[in-house]
Image (cartoon, coloured by chain):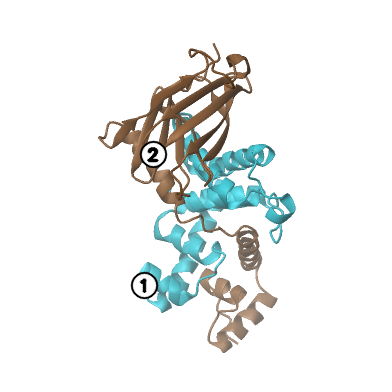
Chain colours: A brown, B cyan
């Protein structure tokens, strides 16, 4: 019998059933039967490690998630690039004359914009202290089913980010009411909209 | 972000979200990170910080989102998301401290659901197949030392 004390890597191979040649594996098995406390502790640690790593394997995110994250954060670092366009405000229930069927401002803020991404509307309703829940719809051109990335900023600092569903709907909870800018990104198209979510 | 994207996304999924909401939570978690960078005292605990924020945001989304899938579908086939939580978080913090090729190798070997073969790992890391086993042994031993020192 080879009574050489196994190295950490040998013990790892042994626990994983990878140790070769078979004679060495047998020798380690024999060694472990009467092993010192340190060796047994190492084996226990390896087994614990394998148990814990197996309890939460990492999932593969959607292929476009990295690009989405990059879009938001690249935009943060270079907001002055030329490829941005401004959304134009079409309607604000706080200042416009409420046409028939348009809700009054007593149940929140309702805004409508036109932009290169498409027309979009959003409703902001008071949620917690200093926060609003924002729901909206981007009227993406027919046939386009790709979600639009939204970023809410307050004085240039990112506060919330989300992605619209394929049908253009979005629902973002707990947006700070002091948010003053909304970015929409669809592919290479980037749009900025000045927003005021405070129900005056 | 790329370093922790899978971890954050996995935490969101494990807390009962569908793929679409988990992606949103991943994005929101990194937004929270940017917002909190000046308040995070200990870079070595970044992984567990991200895991905690992602879990909170996932809970919130699960309670509020219209797109949340039925809980029984989301949790089907996965283990209790809270089992071993602290240990897994500590492991990811230690892996961040380990860093470099060792971190990437251990993640690939022990954390990927697909369980890639040594041949695939060797190709991915540009190393010989025969070198993978000894390298992973050295890396895991280093990780053990980091964890022991942190205790």
**Above/below status of A171 relative to A106:** below
Element type at mark 2 = helix
For residue A199, what is the image quadrant?
Answer: top right
Say the numbered circle drawn on residue A73: 2
Say the numbered circle drawn on residue A36: none
**Callout 2: few (<14), some (14-19), or many (20+) C-alpha neighbours within 10 Å?**
some
Of residues A111 and A3, which is closer to you in this image? A111
Of residues A16 and A149, which is closer to you in this image? A149
**Above/below status of A145 relative to B29:** below
Where's residue A92, x and y in %?
48, 19
Could you tell me which quadrant the C terminus of chain A lies in? top right
**Residue marked by disc 1:** B127
Element type at mark 1 = loop
For residue A83, what is the image quadrant?
Answer: top left
Could you tell me which quadrant the N terminus of chain A lies in? bottom right
Residue B151 visible, this orientation:
no
């Amino acid at each position: 019998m080879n009574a050489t004390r196994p190295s950490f890597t040998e013990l790892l191979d042994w626990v994983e059933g990878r140790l070769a040649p078979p004679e060495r594996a047998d020798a380690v098995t024999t060694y472990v039967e009467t092993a010192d406390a340190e060796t047994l502790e190492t084996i226990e640690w390896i087994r614990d490690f394998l148990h814990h790593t197996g309890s939460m394997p990492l999932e593969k995110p959607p292929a476009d998630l990295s690009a989405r994250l990059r879009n938001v954060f690249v935009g943060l670092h270079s907001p002055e690039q030329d490829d941005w366009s401004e959304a134009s405000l079409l309607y604000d229930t706080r200042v416009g004359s409420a046409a028939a069927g348009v809700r009054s401002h007593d149940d929140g803020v309702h805004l409508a914009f036109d932009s290169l991404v498409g027309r979009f509307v959003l409703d902001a309703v008071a949620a917690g202290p200093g926060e609003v829940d924002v729901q909206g719809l981007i009227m993406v051109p027919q046939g386009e089913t790709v979600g639009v990335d939204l970023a809410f900023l307050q004085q240039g600092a990112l506060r919330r980010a989300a992605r619209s569903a394929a049908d253009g709907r979005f629902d973002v909870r707990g947006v700070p009411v002091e948010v003053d800018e909304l970015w929409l990104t669809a592919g290479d198209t980037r749009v900025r909209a000045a927003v005021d979510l405070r129900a005056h | 972000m790329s370093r922790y994207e899978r971890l954050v996304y996995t935490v969101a999924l494990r807390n009962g979200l569908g793929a679409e909401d988990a992606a949103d939570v991943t994005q929101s978690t990194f937004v929270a990170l940017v917002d909190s960078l000046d308040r995070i005292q200990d870079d070595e605990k970044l992984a567990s910080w991200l895991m905690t924020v992602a879990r909170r945001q996932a809970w919130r989304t699960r309670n509020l989102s219209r797109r949340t899938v039925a809980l029984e579908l989301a949790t089907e086939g996965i283990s209790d998301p809270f089992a071993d939580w602290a240990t897994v978080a500590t492991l990811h913090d230690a892996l961040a401290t380990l860093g470099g090729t060792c971190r990437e190798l251990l993640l690939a070997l022990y954390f990927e659901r697909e369980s890639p073969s040594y041949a695939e790992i060797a190709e991915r890391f540009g190393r010989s197949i025969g070198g993978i086993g000894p390298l992973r042994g050295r890396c895991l031993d280093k990780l053990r030392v980091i964890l022991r020192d942190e205790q």
